[in-house]
Amino acid sequence: MLAPFAANNGFPADSKVYKLEKESELRCEVPWDGQLTVKLLEGVAEIFGTEIAQGQELHYRGGDKFAVFTWYGATVEITGQPEVSYVADETPMVSYVNTHAVLEARRQSAREASSVDGGAAGEETQGPRTIIVGPTDSGKSTLCKILLTYAARLGWKPTLVDLDIGQGQISIPGTIAATLVDKPVDPIEGYEMESPLVYFYGHVSPSENPDLYRTQVEQLASMLERRFAGSAEYRNAGAVINAMGWVESLGYELLLHAIETFRIDVVLVIGQERLFSQLSSQFHGRTRPDGSRIDVVKLNKSGGVVNRNPKHRQRTRTSRVREYFYGIAGDLSPHAMTVSFADVQIYRIGGGPKAPSSALPVGAQSHADPIKVTHVSISKDLTHAVLGISYAASAEQLLSSNVAGFIYVTEVDTMKRTLTYVAPSPGPLPNNLLLAGSLMWVEH
């Protein structure tokens, strides 16, 4: 490992320059109250699969973590005071790019099959459906970016599916979503999305309502099947699915459900030998009715992955919600609006609070319907709530409908019977049917 040398003439006083040897990476963490600027001075380098241009300045904000990797050698300048920065010469990138090569071969095979049968949908024309699994803080989101970016750099348009409701790569926390990735992931802005498909689960843990989580996973998978059936281009490119980090007990059951529902054929396991062993045993020698099999592959976790405590996770979730309304750089201006109670209808999926089994008589079971759509009376309890704006045409369609976007409630006036909210864009709401969960946000 090479230490940074001191700033010299031509460099800012708080800058450091790192000389990276081939197949090494510079890992940095930005303090919450700071920022860093990254500039490639010489050579060729990439951040999570996306190549960066020489002389290009990338500005990272508080809480960001990134790694500048080079296959051939590079010189990188960092301006600012990182919380952590070091050069690592041991990375899992070779195994990651080999994984990409295997997925690429499957995409090519699907494309060739499509050209033979005229583009008609069939199992042989389906590109790889890959799910990335592992415990919390194992680098699943990073591997998603790398694999999707490598595919996009070759002209493919794979689909990203995000099932991690705790953080949210595509939308805000509390959602499951999918989006097309047709270009390399921007190192700062992340995924560029024009029309993502988003379902509002409304909580940050699947244990809040696992039946609703399963239902929305099935709904999202059904919509993707329709998209793939109508486009050989999207079908051949396949999908990369980011799973949540809960991999035990109920979490493991929900993982198996996702693998079956999305008809996964490649399971990439990062960071846990036990999970790899479980899944290998689960799918060993098993084939689907069409003859396809499920390959379970173990990959090493990057040494740069950082374990985050609950406080850090909460702060990250808060930042994700803020980014939705104010933009990643904080350069957007959300709009405050006030509506009458009569102008909106708010619902919750889950049939109200469910008593724990310990609070019920011996042998009794709770009969609350976990996917029942219940009307919510507007009260001050909704202050600071994040609400989803459903595309549903009626309350009966709320369970199966995706959302157009989100608002957060800043004030509820029960005397005037008005609700004040903030939205990312001006004008009337796309729909007056709103969904509530347990997701709250207090603007600072």
Image (tube, helix red, strand yellow):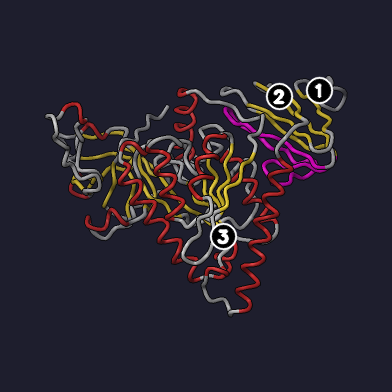
Q: Quadrant of the N terminus?
A: top right
User: Over which residues does the magenta segment extend?
Assistant: 43-71
Q: Which residue is mark 2?
A: 85
Q: CA distance from mark 3 to mark 2?
A: 36 Å
Could you say whether the residue bearing mark 2 is in a helix, strand or loop? Answer: strand
- Count residues near mark 1 (Cα–Cα under 10 Å), then give few for <14, some for 14-19, many for 20+: some
What residue lies at 51% left-to-right and 44% top-to-bottom? 279
At label 2, the amino acid type is Ser
Quadrant of the image occupied by residue 28: top right
**400 shown above or below 312:** below
As drawn, is 299 to the left or to the right of 276?
A: right
- The answer to whether residue 1 is magenta is no
Is mark 2 in CB contact (under 8 Å) with mark 1?
yes
Q: Which residue is mark 1?
A: 4
**From this viewpoint, which residue is outermost toward the left?**
361
At label 1, the amino acid type is Pro
Q: Which mark is residue 238?
A: 3
- Count residues near mark 3 (Cα–Cα under 10 Å), then give few for <14, some for 14-19, many for 20+: many
Residue 280 point in image, percent of width and height: 54, 45
Query: Which mark is nearer the camera, 1 or 3?
Result: 3
Residue 327 point in image, percent of width and height: 51, 40
Between residues 229 and 416, which one lies in front from this camera angle? 229
Could you say whether the residue bearing mark 3 is in a helix, strand or loop? Answer: loop
Is mark 3 in CB contact (under 8 Å) with mark 2?
no
**107 shown above or below 84:** below
Q: Give whichever of discs 1 and 3 has the lower sequence position.
A: 1
Residue 329 point in image, percent of width and height: 56, 37
As drawn, is 35 to the left or to the right of 333?
A: right
Q: Give whichever of discs 3 and 2 has the lower sequence position.
A: 2
**From this viewpoint, which residue is outermost toward the right?**
9
As drawn, is 95 to the left or to the right of 54?
A: left
Q: Give whichever of discs 2 and 1 has the lower sequence position.
A: 1
